[in-house]
Image (spheres, grey):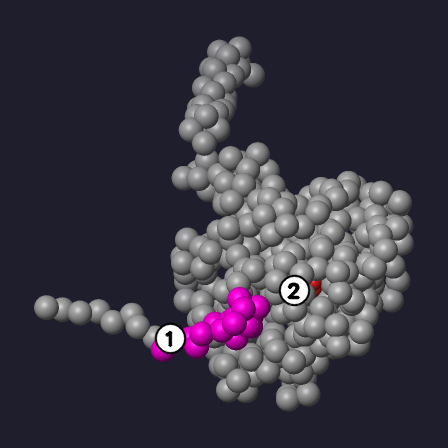
């Protein structure tokens, strides 16, 4: 009998699912890296129990606030979130006996909203078009709720340093250990800035030569701010990719740590995320595709002996109705080749070419018979 062993050491029993947060695996990307010569390692945060890197942040921030006496028994914890922090926070609150109130941008997918409610959070959906200082924005609504709800605590992941610390004490050391110090580049999407700032602060302390590459979205104000120190409101417009980019400058983005910032488009990010799933079996979120697109943009600079760690922030299941839906991809005009096109648009394209040829031929005969 031929046996195939897939067994790995069984993890220890833990008292709470919260104790399974962190120590996520790192997977070598072999196919979706295409022509990029360097060794590409994905740090797969979807393995956390809440399926994103935000588990680390929610747990650390709540436990730090508890220790400092800022969160009291029976408290309501409030946060403005693009979805992932909300789910992690809802999980932490559920297990620690707090009430969780979340304000979410209307850009968040239905799956994300249902996830938040499944963990018992109360959710307020705010228009994604509202500017940060607009009273309807998810930031303003969160502040307002904090003012109105007694015994409430506003987590404030954009500005509270504990967000950075969560990654300084966990993600950074894990990456250093997993690569045995071989890491040469760290590529990470920038939203609140907590992940890239905390992780990079640790990595730069270990080796200041490690290149830190922040990934921003077209439609966000962060890259221009990093380059010029100016907040250009006119640069902000609505975009599809979730988790990265901002219309405010979060205090938790430590711009000094960045060696490069790269902007990416919605379409390229969606295609790269689908590539990771279809070629490497890694079912990761939309922003993981954004980070991979940034790696591809660095293609000419990366050398064979470079070790590039790319942070994959969350799990693909959050985007079933978006990038993993062919209909959504088609609606957005994101499908890249004819194999992925719908039959109708294929026929349209085919006959458009054929009719053009016939039209040109007829035109030619008419013109030549008229001696033109
Ligand atoms: C899917 C996803 N990717 C990336 C990020 C960016 O992480 P950070 O907020 O630590 O900058 C977030 C943040 O919410 C996210 O939800």
Q: Which residues are magenta?
A: 9-26
Tag 2's secondary structure? helix
Observer able to see residue 17: yes
Give x and y (percent) for residue 168: 67, 79
- Ligand 1 sits in quadrant: bottom right
The reply to whether the C-beta atoms of the residues labelled 2 and 1 are less than 8 Å apart is no
Q: At 10% across and 68% down in the image, what residue appears?
A: 1
- Residue marked by disc 2: 96
- Residue marked by disc 1: 10
Give x and y (percent) for residue 111: 57, 44
The answer to whether residue 351 is above or below residue 143 is above
Q: Foreground: 135 or 356?
A: 135
Give x and y (percent) for residue 84: 64, 56
Q: Foreground: 319 or 39?
A: 319
Q: At 78% across and 67% down in the image, what residue appears?
A: 71
* Disc 1 CB within 8 Å of nearest ligand 1 atom: no
Name the side, left or right, on which 167 lies relative to 277: right
């Amino acid at each position: 009998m031929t046996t195939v062993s897939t067994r790995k050491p069984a993890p220890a029993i833990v008292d709470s699912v919260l104790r399974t947060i962190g120590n996520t695996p790192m997977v070598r990307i072999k196919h979706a890296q295409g022509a990029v010569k360097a060794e590409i390692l994905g740090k797969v945060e979807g393995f956390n129990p809440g399926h994103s890197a935000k588990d680390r942040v929610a747990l650390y921030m709540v436990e730090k606030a508890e220790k400092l006496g800022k969160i009291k028994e029976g408290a309501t914890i409030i946060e403005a979130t693009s979805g992932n922090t909300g789910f992690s926070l809802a999980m932490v609150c559920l297990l620690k006996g707090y009430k969780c109130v979340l304000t979410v941008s209307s850009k968040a997918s239905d799956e994300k909203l249902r996830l938040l409610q499944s963990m018992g959070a109360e959710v307020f959906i705010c228009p994604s078009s509202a500017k940060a200082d607009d009273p309807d924005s998810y930031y303003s609504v969160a502040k307002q709720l904090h003012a109105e709800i007694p015994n409430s605590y506003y987590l404030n992941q954009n500005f509270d340093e504990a967000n950075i610390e969560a990654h300084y004490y966990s993600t950074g050391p894990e990456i250093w250990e997993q690569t045995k110090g071989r890491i040469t580049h760290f590529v990470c999407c920038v939203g609140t800035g907590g992940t890239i700032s905390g992780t990079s602060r640790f990595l730069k302390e270990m080796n200041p030569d490690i290149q830190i590459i922040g990934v921003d979205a077209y439609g966000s104000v962060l890259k221009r701010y990093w380059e010029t120190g100016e907040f250009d409101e006119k640069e902000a417009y609505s975009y599809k990719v979730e988790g990265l980019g901002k219309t405010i400058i979060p205090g938790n983005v430590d711009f000094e740590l960045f060696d490069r910032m790269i902007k990416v488009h919605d379409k390229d990010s969606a295609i790269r995320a689908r590539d990771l799933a279809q070629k490497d079996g890694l079912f990761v979120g939309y922003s993981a595709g954004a980070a991979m697109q940034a790696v591809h943009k660095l293609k000419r600079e990366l050398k064979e002996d470079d070790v590039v760690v790319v942070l994959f922030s969350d799990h693909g299941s959050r985007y079933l109705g978006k990038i993993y839906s062919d209909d959504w991809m088609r609606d957005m005009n994101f499908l890249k080749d004819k194999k992925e096109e719908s039959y109708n648009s294929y026929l349209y394209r085919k006959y458009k070419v054929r009719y053009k040829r016939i039209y040109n031929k007829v035109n030619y005969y008419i013109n030549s018979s008229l001696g033109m």
